[in-house]
Image (spheres, rainbow, N blue to C red):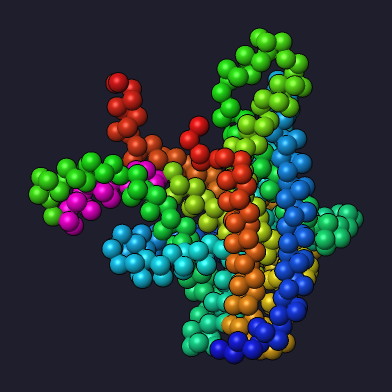
Amino acid sequence: MHPQVILQSFGYLTQAAGVTISVSLAGIALGFVLGACVCMARLSGNAALKRIGAVYVSFFRGVPLLVLLLFIYYFLAEFGIEVPALAAAVGGLGLSSGAYQAEILRGALNAVPRGQGEAATALGYKRADIWRRILLPQALRLSVPPFINEYILLLKASSLVSVVGIAELTRVSMNIASSTYRPLEAYVGGGLFYLAINLCFAALGNVAERRLGIGRAA
Amino acid sequence: MSFEVLWRYMPSLLGGFGVTVLCWSLGAALGLVLGFAIALLNRLRFAPLRWLLQACVEIIRGTPFLMQLFLLYAGGPFIGLRLSATTAGVVGLGLYSSAYFAEIFRGGFNAVPVGLVEAAISVGMKPFDILWRVMFPLALVAAIPAIVNMLIVLSKETVVLSIITVPELMYQMQTMAAETFTAFDSIFAMAIFYWLLVEAVSRVGRWLELRVTAFMTEKARTA
Protein backbone atom coordinates (compact mmCIF):
# COMPACT_ATOMS: atom_id res chain seq x y z
CA MET A 1 0.00 0.00 0.00
CA HIS A 2 1.44 3.37 -1.04
CA PRO A 3 -0.84 6.11 0.27
CA GLN A 4 1.27 8.76 -1.46
CA VAL A 5 -0.38 7.73 -4.74
CA ILE A 6 -3.67 9.01 -3.32
CA LEU A 7 -2.02 12.24 -2.15
CA GLN A 8 -0.30 12.82 -5.51
CA SER A 9 -3.54 12.42 -7.42
CA PHE A 10 -5.57 14.36 -4.87
CA GLY A 11 -6.04 17.25 -7.32
CA TYR A 12 -7.44 15.02 -10.04
CA LEU A 13 -9.71 13.25 -7.61
CA THR A 14 -11.06 16.55 -6.24
CA GLN A 15 -11.80 17.74 -9.76
CA ALA A 16 -13.46 14.42 -10.58
CA ALA A 17 -15.51 14.61 -7.39
CA GLY A 18 -16.77 17.98 -8.66
CA VAL A 19 -17.87 16.33 -11.91
CA THR A 20 -19.56 13.50 -10.00
CA ILE A 21 -21.43 16.01 -7.85
CA SER A 22 -22.50 18.16 -10.83
CA VAL A 23 -23.68 15.18 -12.90
CA SER A 24 -25.54 13.80 -9.89
CA LEU A 25 -27.18 17.14 -9.09
CA ALA A 26 -28.24 17.55 -12.72
CA GLY A 27 -29.63 14.00 -12.67
CA ILE A 28 -31.45 14.69 -9.41
CA ALA A 29 -32.98 17.90 -10.81
CA LEU A 30 -34.10 16.25 -14.05
CA GLY A 31 -35.39 13.29 -12.08
CA PHE A 32 -37.35 15.56 -9.77
CA VAL A 33 -39.04 17.37 -12.66
CA LEU A 34 -39.83 14.08 -14.43
CA GLY A 35 -40.91 12.51 -11.16
CA ALA A 36 -43.26 15.39 -10.38
CA CYS A 37 -44.82 15.12 -13.86
CA VAL A 38 -45.18 11.33 -13.61
CA CYS A 39 -46.63 11.64 -10.12
CA MET A 40 -49.19 14.20 -11.34
CA ALA A 41 -50.06 11.90 -14.23
CA ARG A 42 -50.56 8.99 -11.84
CA LEU A 43 -52.75 11.00 -9.49
CA SER A 44 -54.80 12.66 -12.24
CA GLY A 45 -58.31 11.54 -13.07
CA ASN A 46 -57.39 10.69 -16.64
CA ALA A 47 -57.15 6.90 -17.14
CA ALA A 48 -54.72 7.12 -20.07
CA LEU A 49 -52.36 9.45 -18.18
CA LYS A 50 -52.52 7.16 -15.16
CA ARG A 51 -51.58 4.20 -17.31
CA ILE A 52 -48.66 6.08 -18.91
CA GLY A 53 -47.36 7.07 -15.48
CA ALA A 54 -47.56 3.50 -14.21
CA VAL A 55 -45.78 2.14 -17.29
CA TYR A 56 -43.04 4.78 -16.94
CA VAL A 57 -42.42 3.83 -13.32
CA SER A 58 -42.40 0.09 -13.89
CA PHE A 59 -40.20 0.40 -16.98
CA PHE A 60 -37.53 2.68 -15.56
CA ARG A 61 -37.44 0.88 -12.25
CA GLY A 62 -37.09 -2.43 -14.06
CA VAL A 63 -34.33 -1.53 -16.52
CA PRO A 64 -30.83 -1.55 -15.01
CA LEU A 65 -29.21 1.90 -15.23
CA LEU A 66 -26.19 0.57 -17.09
CA VAL A 67 -28.44 -0.84 -19.81
CA LEU A 68 -30.26 2.48 -20.03
CA LEU A 69 -27.02 4.46 -20.34
CA LEU A 70 -25.57 2.15 -22.99
CA PHE A 71 -28.86 2.28 -24.84
CA ILE A 72 -28.93 6.08 -24.91
CA TYR A 73 -25.25 6.49 -25.72
CA TYR A 74 -24.39 3.64 -28.08
CA PHE A 75 -27.58 2.19 -29.44
CA LEU A 76 -29.48 5.36 -30.25
CA ALA A 77 -26.44 6.35 -32.33
CA GLU A 78 -27.08 3.33 -34.55
CA PHE A 79 -30.41 4.84 -35.47
CA GLY A 80 -28.76 8.16 -36.28
CA ILE A 81 -29.59 9.89 -32.98
CA GLU A 82 -26.24 11.01 -31.60
CA VAL A 83 -26.46 11.93 -27.93
CA PRO A 84 -23.46 13.72 -26.37
CA ALA A 85 -21.88 11.83 -23.46
CA LEU A 86 -22.87 14.39 -20.84
CA ALA A 87 -26.48 14.52 -22.05
CA ALA A 88 -26.63 10.71 -22.09
CA ALA A 89 -25.30 10.56 -18.55
CA VAL A 90 -27.63 13.18 -17.10
CA GLY A 91 -30.54 11.86 -19.17
CA GLY A 92 -30.01 8.28 -18.05
CA LEU A 93 -29.68 9.21 -14.39
CA GLY A 94 -32.67 11.56 -14.60
CA LEU A 95 -34.95 9.11 -16.41
CA SER A 96 -34.28 6.31 -13.96
CA SER A 97 -34.34 8.53 -10.88
CA GLY A 98 -37.58 10.10 -12.11
CA ALA A 99 -39.36 6.80 -11.63
CA TYR A 100 -38.15 6.49 -8.03
CA GLN A 101 -38.83 10.14 -7.19
CA ALA A 102 -42.34 9.86 -8.64
CA GLU A 103 -43.05 6.98 -6.28
CA ILE A 104 -41.63 8.88 -3.29
CA LEU A 105 -43.84 11.88 -4.07
CA ARG A 106 -46.88 9.68 -4.59
CA GLY A 107 -46.28 7.90 -1.32
CA ALA A 108 -45.90 11.18 0.55
CA LEU A 109 -49.04 12.67 -1.00
CA ASN A 110 -51.00 9.54 -0.12
CA ALA A 111 -49.73 9.81 3.45
CA VAL A 112 -51.43 13.20 3.93
CA PRO A 113 -54.81 12.39 5.49
CA ARG A 114 -57.60 12.54 2.89
CA GLY A 115 -59.82 14.46 5.25
CA GLN A 116 -57.60 17.54 5.04
CA GLY A 117 -58.13 17.99 1.32
CA GLU A 118 -61.85 17.36 1.76
CA ALA A 119 -62.07 19.80 4.64
CA ALA A 120 -60.29 22.46 2.58
CA THR A 121 -62.73 21.88 -0.30
CA ALA A 122 -65.62 22.17 2.11
CA LEU A 123 -64.22 25.45 3.42
CA GLY A 124 -64.15 26.76 -0.15
CA TYR A 125 -60.40 26.75 -0.82
CA LYS A 126 -59.50 26.91 -4.50
CA ARG A 127 -57.88 23.78 -5.96
CA ALA A 128 -54.53 25.50 -6.49
CA ASP A 129 -54.58 26.79 -2.92
CA ILE A 130 -55.34 23.34 -1.54
CA TRP A 131 -52.24 22.02 -3.27
CA ARG A 132 -50.03 25.00 -2.50
CA ARG A 133 -50.99 25.56 1.13
CA ILE A 134 -52.17 22.20 2.44
CA LEU A 135 -51.10 19.14 0.47
CA LEU A 136 -47.67 20.03 -0.90
CA PRO A 137 -46.09 21.50 2.26
CA GLN A 138 -46.97 18.39 4.24
CA ALA A 139 -46.08 15.93 1.49
CA LEU A 140 -42.70 17.55 0.79
CA ARG A 141 -41.88 17.44 4.46
CA LEU A 142 -42.74 13.75 4.66
CA SER A 143 -40.69 13.00 1.57
CA VAL A 144 -37.40 14.51 2.77
CA PRO A 145 -35.95 11.31 4.31
CA PRO A 146 -36.73 9.07 1.31
CA PHE A 147 -35.49 11.80 -1.05
CA ILE A 148 -32.14 11.99 0.75
CA ASN A 149 -31.95 8.22 0.55
CA GLU A 150 -32.64 8.31 -3.17
CA TYR A 151 -30.03 11.04 -3.74
CA ILE A 152 -27.36 8.99 -1.99
CA LEU A 153 -28.29 5.99 -4.15
CA LEU A 154 -28.16 8.18 -7.26
CA LEU A 155 -24.76 9.55 -6.33
CA LYS A 156 -23.44 6.02 -6.10
CA ALA A 157 -25.22 5.00 -9.30
CA SER A 158 -23.50 7.92 -11.03
CA SER A 159 -20.32 5.81 -11.02
CA LEU A 160 -21.89 3.97 -13.96
CA VAL A 161 -21.76 7.05 -16.18
CA SER A 162 -18.02 6.34 -16.41
CA VAL A 163 -18.90 3.82 -19.15
CA VAL A 164 -20.00 6.62 -21.49
CA GLY A 165 -16.68 8.37 -20.95
CA ILE A 166 -17.48 11.12 -18.45
CA ALA A 167 -14.35 11.92 -16.41
CA GLU A 168 -16.04 11.53 -13.03
CA LEU A 169 -14.64 9.87 -9.91
CA THR A 170 -14.78 6.27 -11.08
CA ARG A 171 -13.33 7.03 -14.51
CA VAL A 172 -10.53 9.15 -13.04
CA SER A 173 -9.75 6.44 -10.47
CA MET A 174 -9.50 3.98 -13.36
CA ASN A 175 -7.13 6.32 -15.18
CA ILE A 176 -4.99 6.79 -12.09
CA ALA A 177 -4.96 3.02 -11.56
CA SER A 178 -3.76 2.38 -15.09
CA SER A 179 -1.19 5.19 -15.21
CA THR A 180 0.39 4.43 -11.81
CA TYR A 181 -0.12 0.63 -11.85
CA ARG A 182 -1.52 1.04 -8.34
CA PRO A 183 -5.22 0.09 -8.59
CA LEU A 184 -5.56 -0.60 -4.88
CA GLU A 185 -4.60 2.94 -3.85
CA ALA A 186 -6.47 4.57 -6.73
CA TYR A 187 -9.77 2.85 -5.95
CA VAL A 188 -9.41 3.31 -2.19
CA GLY A 189 -8.82 7.01 -2.87
CA GLY A 190 -11.85 7.27 -5.16
CA GLY A 191 -13.94 5.33 -2.65
CA LEU A 192 -12.96 7.71 0.15
CA PHE A 193 -14.22 10.63 -1.95
CA TYR A 194 -17.56 8.92 -2.53
CA LEU A 195 -17.81 8.17 1.17
CA ALA A 196 -17.06 11.79 2.07
CA ILE A 197 -19.68 13.14 -0.37
CA ASN A 198 -22.28 10.68 0.88
CA LEU A 199 -21.62 11.51 4.51
CA CYS A 200 -22.09 15.21 3.63
CA PHE A 201 -25.39 14.37 1.91
CA ALA A 202 -26.53 12.39 4.93
CA ALA A 203 -25.55 15.24 7.28
CA LEU A 204 -27.46 17.75 5.12
CA GLY A 205 -30.43 15.42 5.28
CA ASN A 206 -30.22 15.30 9.08
CA VAL A 207 -30.12 19.11 9.25
CA ALA A 208 -33.12 19.34 6.92
CA GLU A 209 -35.03 16.78 8.98
CA ARG A 210 -34.33 18.63 12.19
CA ARG A 211 -35.28 22.02 10.76
CA LEU A 212 -38.48 20.65 9.30
CA GLY A 213 -39.23 18.95 12.59
CA ILE A 214 -39.55 15.47 11.13
CA GLY A 215 -39.39 12.75 13.74
CA ARG A 216 -40.55 15.14 16.41
CA ALA A 217 -43.70 14.02 18.20
CA ALA A 218 -46.65 15.61 16.44
CA MET B 1 -34.63 -7.13 -37.03
CA SER B 2 -33.18 -10.50 -37.99
CA PHE B 3 -34.13 -13.49 -35.93
CA GLU B 4 -31.45 -15.47 -37.72
CA VAL B 5 -28.63 -13.60 -35.95
CA LEU B 6 -30.44 -13.90 -32.67
CA TRP B 7 -30.87 -17.63 -33.27
CA ARG B 8 -27.19 -18.07 -34.13
CA TYR B 9 -26.16 -16.32 -30.92
CA MET B 10 -28.77 -18.01 -28.79
CA PRO B 11 -26.33 -20.50 -27.17
CA SER B 12 -24.01 -17.71 -26.01
CA LEU B 13 -26.96 -15.59 -24.89
CA LEU B 14 -28.43 -18.48 -22.91
CA GLY B 15 -24.97 -19.15 -21.47
CA GLY B 16 -24.75 -15.49 -20.46
CA PHE B 17 -28.19 -15.69 -18.90
CA GLY B 18 -27.01 -18.75 -16.97
CA VAL B 19 -23.95 -16.88 -15.70
CA THR B 20 -26.16 -13.94 -14.69
CA VAL B 21 -28.50 -16.20 -12.72
CA LEU B 22 -25.56 -18.07 -11.18
CA CYS B 23 -23.72 -14.90 -10.09
CA TRP B 24 -26.94 -13.44 -8.76
CA SER B 25 -27.95 -16.50 -6.74
CA LEU B 26 -24.47 -17.26 -5.37
CA GLY B 27 -23.86 -13.59 -4.59
CA ALA B 28 -27.24 -13.28 -2.87
CA ALA B 29 -26.65 -16.47 -0.87
CA LEU B 30 -23.24 -15.22 0.25
CA GLY B 31 -24.70 -11.83 1.10
CA LEU B 32 -27.55 -13.35 3.11
CA VAL B 33 -25.21 -15.56 5.13
CA LEU B 34 -22.68 -12.76 5.75
CA GLY B 35 -25.43 -10.25 6.49
CA PHE B 36 -27.05 -12.58 9.00
CA ALA B 37 -23.67 -13.21 10.63
CA ILE B 38 -23.01 -9.46 10.89
CA ALA B 39 -26.46 -8.88 12.39
CA LEU B 40 -25.85 -11.66 14.95
CA LEU B 41 -22.37 -10.39 15.88
CA ASN B 42 -23.87 -6.92 16.25
CA ARG B 43 -26.11 -8.28 18.98
CA LEU B 44 -23.13 -9.30 21.11
CA ARG B 45 -22.47 -6.86 23.93
CA PHE B 46 -18.95 -6.09 22.73
CA ALA B 47 -18.71 -2.47 21.65
CA PRO B 48 -15.43 -2.45 19.64
CA LEU B 49 -16.64 -5.30 17.43
CA ARG B 50 -19.92 -3.50 16.91
CA TRP B 51 -18.16 -0.27 15.89
CA LEU B 52 -15.92 -2.16 13.50
CA LEU B 53 -18.85 -3.95 11.85
CA GLN B 54 -20.91 -0.78 11.65
CA ALA B 55 -17.95 1.02 10.03
CA CYS B 56 -17.65 -1.78 7.45
CA VAL B 57 -21.37 -1.60 6.72
CA GLU B 58 -21.22 2.19 6.30
CA ILE B 59 -18.20 1.98 3.99
CA ILE B 60 -19.86 -0.62 1.79
CA ARG B 61 -23.13 1.29 1.70
CA GLY B 62 -21.39 4.60 1.06
CA THR B 63 -19.34 3.61 -1.99
CA PRO B 64 -20.53 2.56 -5.46
CA PHE B 65 -20.69 -1.13 -6.32
CA LEU B 66 -18.60 -0.56 -9.45
CA MET B 67 -15.80 0.94 -7.33
CA GLN B 68 -15.85 -2.05 -4.98
CA LEU B 69 -15.66 -4.42 -7.93
CA PHE B 70 -12.65 -2.61 -9.37
CA LEU B 71 -10.99 -2.64 -5.97
CA LEU B 72 -11.56 -6.37 -5.60
CA TYR B 73 -10.69 -7.36 -9.16
CA ALA B 74 -7.87 -4.94 -10.02
CA GLY B 75 -6.61 -4.11 -6.54
CA GLY B 76 -6.94 -7.61 -5.10
CA PRO B 77 -3.82 -9.08 -6.71
CA PHE B 78 -1.71 -6.43 -4.94
CA ILE B 79 -2.65 -7.92 -1.59
CA GLY B 80 -2.38 -11.49 -2.84
CA LEU B 81 -6.05 -11.90 -3.71
CA ARG B 82 -6.08 -13.29 -7.24
CA LEU B 83 -9.66 -13.88 -8.34
CA SER B 84 -11.09 -14.71 -11.73
CA ALA B 85 -13.57 -12.16 -13.07
CA THR B 86 -16.57 -14.34 -12.24
CA THR B 87 -15.34 -15.19 -8.74
CA ALA B 88 -14.59 -11.53 -8.10
CA GLY B 89 -18.09 -10.73 -9.33
CA VAL B 90 -19.76 -13.24 -7.01
CA VAL B 91 -17.63 -12.23 -4.01
CA GLY B 92 -18.23 -8.56 -4.83
CA LEU B 93 -22.01 -9.05 -5.04
CA GLY B 94 -21.90 -11.00 -1.78
CA LEU B 95 -19.91 -8.38 0.13
CA TYR B 96 -21.95 -5.52 -1.32
CA SER B 97 -25.30 -7.07 -0.47
CA SER B 98 -24.14 -8.32 2.95
CA ALA B 99 -24.09 -4.72 4.23
CA TYR B 100 -27.69 -4.19 3.13
CA PHE B 101 -28.84 -7.59 4.36
CA ALA B 102 -27.17 -6.92 7.72
CA GLU B 103 -29.21 -3.74 8.11
CA ILE B 104 -32.36 -5.57 7.03
CA PHE B 105 -31.79 -8.36 9.58
CA ARG B 106 -30.98 -5.80 12.26
CA GLY B 107 -34.32 -4.13 11.58
CA GLY B 108 -35.98 -7.54 11.68
CA PHE B 109 -34.48 -8.39 15.06
CA ASN B 110 -35.52 -4.99 16.38
CA ALA B 111 -39.08 -5.72 15.30
CA VAL B 112 -39.32 -8.76 17.59
CA PRO B 113 -41.46 -7.73 20.59
CA VAL B 114 -39.31 -7.56 23.76
CA GLY B 115 -42.08 -9.21 25.76
CA LEU B 116 -41.81 -12.41 23.74
CA VAL B 117 -38.09 -12.67 24.45
CA GLU B 118 -38.66 -11.96 28.12
CA ALA B 119 -41.37 -14.60 28.19
CA ALA B 120 -39.00 -17.11 26.58
CA ILE B 121 -36.35 -16.31 29.20
CA SER B 122 -38.80 -16.69 32.04
CA VAL B 123 -40.07 -20.08 30.85
CA GLY B 124 -36.43 -21.16 30.93
CA MET B 125 -35.52 -21.45 27.24
CA LYS B 126 -31.82 -21.67 26.47
CA PRO B 127 -30.26 -18.62 24.73
CA PHE B 128 -29.73 -20.55 21.50
CA ASP B 129 -33.31 -21.79 21.53
CA ILE B 130 -34.59 -18.27 22.13
CA LEU B 131 -32.60 -17.08 19.14
CA TRP B 132 -33.48 -19.98 16.86
CA ARG B 133 -37.10 -20.65 17.83
CA VAL B 134 -38.42 -17.28 18.93
CA MET B 135 -36.38 -14.44 17.50
CA PHE B 136 -35.26 -15.82 14.14
CA PRO B 137 -38.71 -16.78 12.79
CA LEU B 138 -40.25 -13.47 13.83
CA ALA B 139 -37.31 -11.44 12.54
CA LEU B 140 -37.46 -13.28 9.22
CA VAL B 141 -41.15 -12.56 8.82
CA ALA B 142 -40.59 -8.88 9.55
CA ALA B 143 -37.64 -8.73 7.15
CA ILE B 144 -38.96 -10.74 4.22
CA PRO B 145 -40.43 -7.84 2.17
CA ALA B 146 -37.15 -5.92 2.46
CA ILE B 147 -35.15 -9.05 1.59
CA VAL B 148 -37.21 -9.66 -1.53
CA ASN B 149 -36.78 -6.03 -2.50
CA MET B 150 -33.01 -6.28 -2.08
CA LEU B 151 -32.92 -9.49 -4.14
CA ILE B 152 -34.60 -7.63 -7.00
CA VAL B 153 -32.18 -4.73 -6.68
CA LEU B 154 -29.32 -7.23 -6.70
CA SER B 155 -30.56 -8.97 -9.84
CA LYS B 156 -30.23 -5.64 -11.62
CA GLU B 157 -26.79 -4.97 -10.15
CA THR B 158 -25.44 -8.10 -11.87
CA VAL B 159 -25.34 -6.04 -15.08
CA VAL B 160 -22.40 -4.10 -13.63
CA LEU B 161 -20.35 -7.31 -13.60
CA SER B 162 -20.05 -7.02 -17.40
CA ILE B 163 -17.66 -4.10 -16.86
CA ILE B 164 -15.08 -6.39 -15.24
CA THR B 165 -15.61 -8.85 -18.15
CA VAL B 166 -17.73 -11.46 -16.39
CA PRO B 167 -19.29 -13.29 -19.35
CA GLU B 168 -22.86 -12.67 -18.21
CA LEU B 169 -25.85 -11.68 -20.30
CA MET B 170 -24.99 -8.01 -20.80
CA TYR B 171 -21.44 -8.93 -21.82
CA GLN B 172 -22.62 -11.54 -24.35
CA MET B 173 -25.16 -9.07 -25.68
CA GLN B 174 -22.52 -6.41 -26.23
CA THR B 175 -20.28 -8.98 -27.92
CA MET B 176 -23.11 -9.93 -30.24
CA ALA B 177 -23.89 -6.30 -31.01
CA ALA B 178 -20.23 -5.57 -31.74
CA GLU B 179 -19.72 -8.62 -33.97
CA THR B 180 -22.88 -8.40 -36.01
CA PHE B 181 -23.84 -4.71 -35.85
CA THR B 182 -27.30 -5.69 -34.69
CA ALA B 183 -27.94 -3.08 -32.05
CA PHE B 184 -31.69 -3.34 -32.15
CA ASP B 185 -31.84 -7.14 -31.91
CA SER B 186 -29.48 -7.22 -28.96
CA ILE B 187 -31.43 -4.58 -27.05
CA PHE B 188 -34.64 -6.42 -27.85
CA ALA B 189 -33.26 -9.75 -26.61
CA MET B 190 -31.73 -8.14 -23.54
CA ALA B 191 -35.01 -6.48 -22.60
CA ILE B 192 -36.79 -9.84 -22.79
CA PHE B 193 -34.17 -11.72 -20.77
CA TYR B 194 -33.95 -9.14 -17.98
CA TRP B 195 -37.68 -8.71 -17.88
CA LEU B 196 -38.02 -12.50 -17.48
CA LEU B 197 -35.46 -12.50 -14.67
CA VAL B 198 -36.91 -9.58 -12.72
CA GLU B 199 -40.47 -10.83 -13.23
CA ALA B 200 -39.50 -14.33 -12.02
CA VAL B 201 -37.69 -12.94 -8.98
CA SER B 202 -40.56 -10.69 -7.99
CA ARG B 203 -43.13 -13.48 -8.47
CA VAL B 204 -41.17 -15.92 -6.34
CA GLY B 205 -40.65 -13.10 -3.85
CA ARG B 206 -44.35 -12.32 -3.64
CA TRP B 207 -45.16 -16.01 -3.19
CA LEU B 208 -42.55 -16.28 -0.44
CA GLU B 209 -43.89 -13.17 1.25
CA LEU B 210 -47.45 -14.50 1.25
CA ARG B 211 -46.23 -17.86 2.47
CA VAL B 212 -44.27 -16.66 5.52
CA THR B 213 -46.80 -14.01 6.48
CA ALA B 214 -49.74 -16.38 5.97
CA PHE B 215 -50.34 -16.71 9.70
CA MET B 216 -50.73 -12.95 10.03
CA THR B 217 -53.15 -12.52 7.14
CA GLU B 218 -55.03 -15.55 8.43
CA LYS B 219 -55.36 -13.88 11.80
CA ALA B 220 -56.39 -10.63 10.20
CA ARG B 221 -59.18 -12.41 8.35
CA THR B 222 -60.61 -14.11 11.41
CA ALA B 223 -60.27 -11.05 13.64
Horizontal relation, residue B33 to residue A164: left or right: left
* Residue nearest the viewer, comparing A158 with B80: A158
Is residue B164 in view from this perspective? no
> In percent of the image, x 58 and y 27: which residue is there?
A112
Residue B164 % position (x, y): 62, 73
Residue A125 % position (x, y): 72, 15
Is residue B120 in view from this perspective? yes
Q: Quadrant of residue B72?
A: bottom right
Answer whether residue B130 is magenta in the image. Answer: yes
Q: Which residues are magenta?
A: B127-144
Answer whether residue A189 is magenta in the image. Answer: no
The quarter of the rendered structure image containing the N terminus of chain A is bottom right
* Residue nearest the viewer, comparing A200 with B185: A200
Q: Main secondary structure of the magenta part?
A: helix
Rendered position, A173 above or below A80? below
Count the marks: how many?
0
Residue B21 % position (x, y): 50, 59
Horizontal relation, residue A45 to residue B13: left or right: right
* Residue nearest the viewer, comparing A78 with B87: B87
